[in-house]
Amino acid sequence: MKKYLPLIVLLFLASCQQTGDLTSIVKPAAKPAPLDEATIISGLKEALQVGIKNAVSFVSKSDGYLKSPKIALPLPPQLKDWADKLRSIGLGSQVDEFILSMNRAAEKAAAKAVDIFLDAISKMTVEDANNILKGSENAATAFFEKVTRKSLYGVFAPVIKQAMDEVGITKLYKTLIDKYNSIPLVQKVNFDLADYVNNKALDGLYYMLAQEEAKIRKDPAARVTDLLKKVFGS
C-alpha cells in the first residue's frame, strides 16, 4: 500500500488544482486589517474607564487602603517622634485611631473621584493613544498621572478636606497635636496632614489603576468588552 501513496497524493493535488481548491489550501490566512485610529483611542479610553472604575471600587471600600500594604497610608515619617512620644504617655490607641482615620479619609475621597478621572480620560488625543498602545504595561497610567496629577490634586483637595472632617481626623489630629505640644521640651509639630493624605490617596489610586491596566494588557479574561478584545486581543 505504501508504494501507492505518492500517486494518491499527486492525484489529490491535481484534483485540487482543477477545482481551484489548492490555492485555498496553501494560501496563508489573511491578516486582520490594522485598527484605525478611532478604534485605538476608543479602546484605550474604554480600558482606562474600566480600570478606573475597578480601582476606585477597590480602594473606596472599607479597608481598601488600610488592608492593602502597597497603598495603605502609614503614619507620616515626619510624625514618628510625635507618635512615639504620645504612645509613651499612654495615647497609643489614639495614635492607632489617627492612622485608621487617615485611611478612612482616603477611602471617602477616592469614592468621589471617578468623574474627575473620567473627564481627564476623555481628553486623550490620538497621538497619546498610539504612544500608549505601543508602550509598557503601565504606559497609560504613567501618562495619565503625568498630565493630570497637578490639576487633579487641586480638585481633589476639598474632597479630602471634607472627608477628613467627616471621619473626625481633623479634630483628632488637633487634639493630639495640642496634647503633644503641651509636653515640656518637645519640638512643636507643624505638619500639613491634608497634603499628605491627598498625595497618598492619589498614589494609591494610580497604583491600583496601573494594576488594572496591566491585567487588561496581559489577561484576556480582564477584557470585558468586545472593544477591549479587539484592541488588546481576545
Image (cartoon, rainbow, N blue to C red):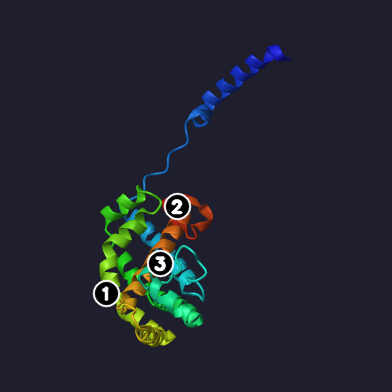
Q: Which numbered mark, 2 or 3, is in the foreground of this view? A: 3
Res. 217 mark = 2
Amino acid type at circle 1 is: Gly
Q: Residues within 10 Å of mark 2 (few under 14, many from 20)?
A: many
101 and 136: which is toward the camera: 101
The residue drawn where x is 51% and y is 52% is 219
Q: Where's the N terminus, which quadrant? A: top right
Query: Residue 135 versus residue 91: which sits nearer the camera?
Result: 91
Graded by Cα atoms within 10 Å as few (under 14), some (14 to 19) or many (20 or more), the crowding at tag 3 reads many
Q: Which residue is mark 3?
A: 205
Work out whether mark 1 precedes mark 2 in sequence or the reverse, and give the earlier one. Answer: 1
Tell me if I can see residue 229 in this picture.
yes
Using the rendered image of the protein, determine whether residue 101 is visible from the camera's viewpoint. Answer: no
Task: Tell me which amino acid carries mark 2.
Answer: Arg
Q: Position of residue 146 (x, y in %)?
A: 28, 60
Label 1 sits on residue: 154
The picture quadrant where one finds residue 32 is top left
> At 33% across and 50% down in the image, what residue appears?
36
In this rendered view, identify the residue nearer to me: 40 or 134: 134
Q: Quadrant of residue 144?
A: bottom left
Label 1 to label 3: alpha-carbon separation: 16 Å
Query: Could you say whether the residue bearing mark 2 is in a helix, strand or loop?
Result: helix
In which image quadrant can residue 161 be found?
bottom left
- CA separation in Å, label 1 and label 2: 31 Å
